[in-house]
Image (cartoon, grey):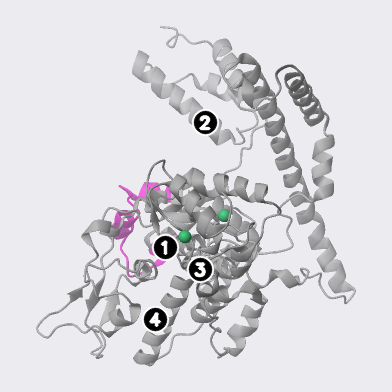
Amino acid sequence: MALKGISINVLFAFFDWLLSVRKDRLGAASTLQTYQNVFCLVRKKETGCLEIDPLIKSQMNGHGLRMEKKKKPIMRAEDEFELLKTLILSVEIAFDHERHRIQLGLIMQLAGITGNRPALLGVCYKDIKITLLPDPKGGELPRRLVQEYQGLTRRERDAFAAPELTSPKQLFRFRIPSGQKQLPVPLKEAIQHVPLFRRSKPTVNGVRTSDDEALSDSTLRSRMVTLGSVTGMELPTGPYTFRRGSGEALDNSSFISESQRNLILQHHNSTVFLKSNLSRYITGDTGAAYRGLEPQTALMRLASGMSRTIDRRRPRKLDAAQRAEVDRHPEVRLLRRRQKTLCKLIREKHGSIASMKGTPVYDQYQKAYHAHRNMKRRQEEALLQEVKARYKREQLVIDIQRQLKGLPSTELEMAKAEDYVFVERVRVIDALFTFATPSPEEECRRRVEAINALTALCRLQEGKRPRCLKPSALDSKLERDLTRPSVLHLPSLSDSIPIKCEATQCIFRLGCEALPTETRLKSFHSRGDLKKHLHRKHLHHHPDGQPIACPHPRCHVDLGSTMHLQNHVELVHKTPT
Ligand SMILES: [Zn+2]
Ligand SMILES: [Zn+2]
């Protein structure tokens, strides 16, 4: 009943309250419109009333919300290439495990090709079909279908149902049996329901890829945003930018019908595409169309793509001085003081904050802690937006002024000495950034090397490795097509590690081939430090009472539990646990 005869006062009070509560997160008028629509739907269902009086609706506007439509950037193949380049080359893009680098690259490629929503993260091995088909042009070598999946499937050494199929080289040697028109290459039954894109997981032996947990949507989104911003694009990159890019390509293609496009994008009619996917920016050459001229397609594509906005100088984070400015903000200071006072009080009275878990005092402290942190984040975000806006206003003028004065443009600082990428990444760069060759044999070799390079990279955990190439070397490489001798192979470290370790070395690291040499051999400051590290980073992640193998690379004794392992390690390898 209350919903039926709702008055402007009540409604106004409600939305006014909503606006004040959600002030920091509600930016666009369209978001408020969504709230209104939901409200109207509920009201209609409950009371049968159709619409809210339009007068009431119009009075609800004007709250200082953003009225213009959100920009809808489109990620085209050439923009995606820029992202992939950054992903492979940039030292700023770091992961706890290198598999994530390759995984992200593959996700982006699939997102572009299939136009799929983030549902891509639900893809399992059962969704992948690898089939060799005869070359329609009559060539001797079979063509592979679903090639885009190759990088990952072959990485998993034992992914194939045929037990002796273990290397990419073999796959490229297959021929279609005579009398047949195809050769499907099935994957193992056991991995059918394993998600293709998985998250990483801390284990007793270091960071591993989880066996069954898919990568989360939020992780994917934040990685894409970071990648886009490091690449220097102005608008944020996300799964939907790819979907729009794919949608546009399908829409413009004369080989794909409208109904096929809707089917691929899972739209039940074309209105959905028009409303949600089509970029607001008109990408066709309207001028040429009006004058009856040939469209300047390449120029229009350049003008409307995301790559156009690339500027690596654009500020991405606050510098030390700007962060200090946030710290001096009155509201941040007030909340910090409140948190600190509470912290001191609890420590004096009860010893430590952690010991008060479950009591009202603890909850009170948590509240104060979060209030400070959230306020700080909000202020940081606001300042960053301001810094970016200032950059946009001022840098263009600076650039033009410099040109007028005949000065060179301000370039990004050259990469520092430590900004070099390591051997395994150089190998990937060398393998991926090459041109396709007309010779089928050469092409097979090129692909096999690319897969092997990716496989080698995928085994590595994060860590400091000796660097050997400036990331900027790519551009010159593409120009000159270096045929640099392949990466040097070092003798295995594992074979040379003595049975008796140093008393401050972590035995798990010593045994972990995915880590760089420097990290493996690293010594801790004291035995106490090492013990803390062992418990927190390793033993803590192993289930109680479960058998465990000694991680020493030349030992491999199976032990009953972590307790047995601790005794063994102390006795045989002379490191404390
Ligand atoms: Zn360790
Ligand atoms: Zn051992």
Residue located beneath label 4 in the image: 448
Residue 332, horizontal then vertical, whole percent: 78, 31
Quarter of image, res 411: bottom right
> Which region is colored magenta?
248-275
At label 3, counting other C-alpha atoms closer than 10 Å, the crowd grade (few under 14, some 14-19, many 20 or more) is few
**Pick the front one: 241 or 296:** 241
**What is the x, y in percent for residue 520?**
59, 64
Residue indicated by mark 3:
289
Count of marks placed on residues: 4
User: Is residue 3 left or right of 60 when viewed as pictured?
Assistant: left
Q: Nearer the viewer, mark 2 or mark 4?
A: 4
Give the secondary structure at mark 4. helix
**Is the residue under label 3 in contact with that under label 2 (CB below 8 Å)?**
no
Number of other residues with Cα within 10 Å of mark 4, as a class: few under 14, some 14 to 19, many 20 or more: many
Question: Is residue 270 shown in magenta?
Answer: yes
Q: Nearer the viewer, mark 4 or mark 1?
A: 1
Q: State the image coordinates of residue 527 (x, y, percent, origin top left).
A: 66, 51
Q: Which mark is residue 556?
A: 1
Q: Is residue 538 visible from the viewing direction of this image?
A: yes
Q: What secondary structure is marked by label 3? A: helix
- Is residue 204 in view? no
Q: Are marks 2 and 1 in contact (CB under 8 Å)?
A: no
Q: Give me the disc on residue 33.
A: 2
